[in-house]
Image (cartoon, helix red, strand yellow):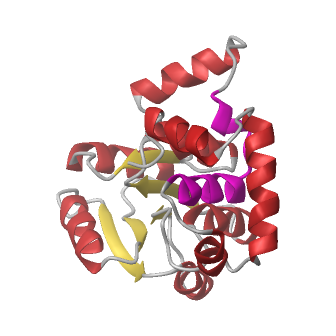
Amino acid sequence: MGTETIKVLLVDDHTVVRNGVRLMLSSASDIEVTGEAASAQEAVRAVDQQRFDVALVDIALPGKNGLDLLKTLRIAHPQLAVLILSTYAEDIYAMRALKLGAAGYLTKDSSAATLVEAVRKASNGGKYVSPSLAEKFASAMSGQAPASHEVLSDRELEVLKLLARGESLVNIGEQLHLSPKTVTTYRSRILDKMHLGSNAELTRYALENGLLN
């Protein structure tokens, strides 16, 4: 982008997180946070109203989650680079996000230097991939079998995590705006896809694979 300033949109429902990321990015003279949003809806309005080069998006947003927002932005604003910045470990969502067109995946314990590097790379049309994630890509390319949860859809993964936390079907339905009957269908589908026999096995799998971190 030459000497132009990289304009960044921060999308996170926690003000303290947005303030922290803004502060870390302020160490780079060529990067400026020119917009903030606390939800997917606010983010869509922001990108409709002004131009951004890069959006830093959290996954755990109220209402529509960050992956859903990523899908929307890739269709409506394909020129906008979307970096996912999440508390979730790479193992859970990184491959999924990159397959959906994300320009990179970072965890919230990333250093300021890493954030700046990722934003610059994304603004230039590249993808930021950590060394550990690059290894996972190499394994996938070599035909290594994916982890069981990677065969689930985004919504199925959400249901899995809530079931593993011990949430009732009614509570899960309320959080995801689904009927308990639909949640039951999702549960059956998850157990079938993952070859598990009970909620207890599902919870053990989630704990062993860091899905509840």
The residue drawn where x is 44% and y is 81% is 37
| Residue 110, horizontal then vertical, whole percent | 27, 46
Instruction: Tell whether 205 sits left or right of 20.
Output: right
Count of all numbered marks drawn on residues in the image: 0
The residue drawn where x is 69% and y is 50% is 100
The residue drawn where x is 66% and y is 49% is 101
| Camera-nearest residue between 2 and 157 | 157
Q: Is residue 36 above or below residue 78?
A: below
| Residue 154, horizontal then vertical, whole percent | 68, 55
Instruction: Tell whether 204 sits left or right of 191.
Output: left
| Residue 127 seen in this snapshot | no
Q: Is residue 101 magenta?
A: no
Secondary structure mainly formed by the magenta segment: helix
Q: Which span is picked out in magenta?
A: 147-164
- Residue sticking out furthest to the top: 142
Q: Tell me the quarter of the picture where residue 132 sits.
A: top left
Instruction: Tell whether 150 sits left or right of 121.
Output: right
| Residue 38 seen in this snapshot | yes
| Residue 186, horizontal then vertical, whole percent | 77, 58
Q: Is residue 94 above or below residue 76?
A: above
Q: Is residue 47 above or below residue 183?
A: below
The residue drawn where x is 40% and y is 47% is 106
Q: Is residue 158 magenta?
A: yes
| Camera-nearest residue between 123 and 74 | 74
